[in-house]
Image (cartoon, rainbow, N blue to C red):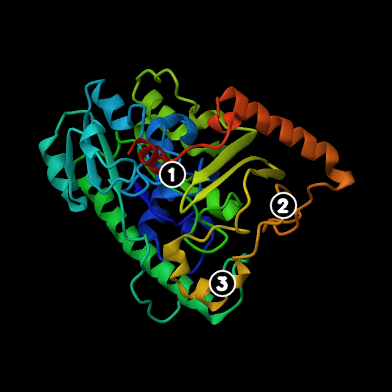
């Protein structure tokens, strides 16, 4: 199960005013990962990583997949991998990794509410089900009265517009949680809850200024809940090791007793990581950046001039951005950014260039360049052309 744009903004992650009882119950019955990060802070690249176990620059989706942007996967989707091993693979709701969903390998594509019927018809069959909820994507319905104790993230300005927007976010999360509850109930009624390995996650951080489309933690942090009673993934445990969303597909394959295909860059969730890597190349415009994050520090390298942070068009339409666009539309001041996440969790104080952290900066820079070389990042060979550029050159 996936949803859009919520990061870790759920009650079970400590956000008290969020109404998410069904996902809270999933966390109590299963396992909650405290430190899961997406490979990218925007929809299509991150979702492609979920579906392939590969970084965006290797699965082919380095920007948005819909018309006008036109990025396409060039490796098999999880649906095809499971279908090739005898599973029926079903998609419920939308997907955002291709303009050609018929190529992904799903046995059938359904409306989001069709899960009970499919489960009823598939008794005894091995299934790969992907359920993608749309409720938490902008534009949000008008919000009612803000809930008591509404939390405003620290990276947002302390203004009434932030209250308005966060109230709408939490209202959308409550609607999504109800939809997730209907799926979990259908799994119970079909008698498959004990054997099912259920994953819930999201594509990237909250769709708010200085979150989505940035490599700061609010852009790449994601919820990850897992439950598999038959396999011992149960009991409300907390996993604190860092993991990446490219690790989810390998975990599912290993649990199903299937081989992990060549080229998959993720490792099973149980392995954990001492560092994660994330990237952005294109969203609204070309804005290549890469980062490495360990338990204490984050190093970001920006490869082009741009605004201080990108604010996508749908977020620009929101009241926070409209209250003061200049807050986000300044020129980017630094090519390199280094943050001490323990002392500065909001990543406001760039330490790059300071003599007292020079050794840390050099170590993380070396690690980032090494990752780019090892994963054959095309950015090493020069600016990356977009599908639109290639099309323009051919016509």
Q: Which residue is mark 3?
A: 325
The picture places residue 362, in percent across and down from the top left corner, at 79, 35
Label 1: which secondary element? loop
Which of the 4 image quadrants contains residue 211? Answer: bottom right
Most extreme residue toward the left is 121
What is the distance, in whole Å, between disc 2 and disc 3 at their CAs? Answer: 20 Å
- Badge 2 or badge 3: first in the primary sequence: 3
Q: CA distance from mark 3 to mark 1?
A: 24 Å
Question: Which of the image's four quarters has the C terminus?
Answer: top left
Pointer 3 and pointer 1: residues touching (CB < 8 Å)? Answer: no
Label 3 neighbour load within 10 Å: few <14, some 14-19, many 20+ = few
Check whether the beta carbons of the residues at disc 2 and disc 1 lie within 8 A of each other: no
Residue at 30% from the left image edge and 25% from the top image edge: 81
Question: Residue 390 shows which numbered tag?
Answer: none
In the image, residue 394 lies at what x, y percent?
A: 35, 35
Residue under pointer 1: 63
Image point (19%, 53%), residue name: 113
Q: Are marks 2 and 3 in contact (CB under 8 Å)?
A: no
Q: Which residue lies at the image location 64% right of the left edge and 35% below the top edge?
A: 275
The residue carrying mark 2 is: 334
- Is 361 displayed left or right of 368 in the figure? right
In the image, taking residue 326 as reference, residue 175 lies left or right, namely left
Q: Which of these two is toward me, 148 or 206?
A: 206
């Amino acid at each position: 199960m996936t949803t859009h744009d919520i990061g870790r903004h759920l009650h079970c992650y400590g956000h008290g005013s969020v109404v998410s009882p069904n996902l809270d119950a999933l966390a109590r019955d299963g396992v909650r990962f405290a430190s899961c990060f997406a490979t990218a802070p925007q929809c299509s690249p991150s979702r492609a990583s979920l579906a392939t176990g590969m970084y965006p620059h290797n699965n082919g989706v380095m920007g948005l997949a819909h018309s006008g942007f036109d990025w396409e996967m060039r490796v098999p989707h999880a649906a095809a991998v499971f279908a090739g091993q005898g599973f029926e693979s079903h998609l419920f709701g939308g997907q955002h990794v291709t303009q050609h969903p018929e190529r992904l390998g799903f046995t059938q594509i359904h409306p989001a509410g069709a899960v009970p019927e499919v489960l009823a018809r598939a008794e005894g069959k091995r299934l790969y089900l992907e359920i993608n909820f749309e409720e938490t994507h902008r534009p949000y319905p008008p919000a009612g009265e803000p809930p008591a104790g509404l939390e405003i993230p620290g990276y947002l300005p302390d203004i009434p517009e932030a209250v308005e927007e966060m109230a709408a976010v939490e209202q959308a999360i409550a609607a999504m949680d109800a939809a997730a509850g209907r799926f979990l109930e259908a799994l119970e009624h079909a008698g498959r809850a004990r054997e099912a390995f259920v994953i819930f996650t999201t594509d990237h951080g909250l769709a708010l200024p200085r979150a989505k489309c940035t490599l700061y933690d609010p852009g790449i942090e994601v919820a990850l809940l897992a439950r598999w009673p038959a396999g011992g993934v149960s009991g409300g445990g907390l996993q604190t090791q860092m993991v990446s969303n490219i690790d989810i597909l390998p975990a599912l394959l290993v649990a199903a007793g299937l081989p992990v295909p060549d080229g998959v860059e993720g490792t099973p969730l149980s392995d954990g990581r001492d560092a994660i890597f994330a990237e952005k190349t294109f969203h609204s415009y070309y804005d290549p950046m890469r980062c490495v994050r360990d338990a204490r520090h984050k190093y970001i390298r920006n490869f082009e001039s741009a605004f201080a942070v990108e604010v996508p068009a749908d977020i620009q339409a929101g009241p926070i951005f409209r209250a003061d666009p200049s807050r986000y539309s300044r020129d980017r001041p630094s090519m390199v950014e280094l943050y001490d996440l323990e002392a500065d969790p909001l990543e406001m104080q760039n330490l790059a260039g300071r003599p007292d952290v020079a050794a840390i900066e050099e170590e993380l820079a070396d690690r980032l360049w090494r990752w780019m070389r090892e994963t054959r990042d095309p950015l090493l060979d020069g600016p990356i052309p977009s599908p639109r550029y290639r099309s323009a050159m051919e016509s």
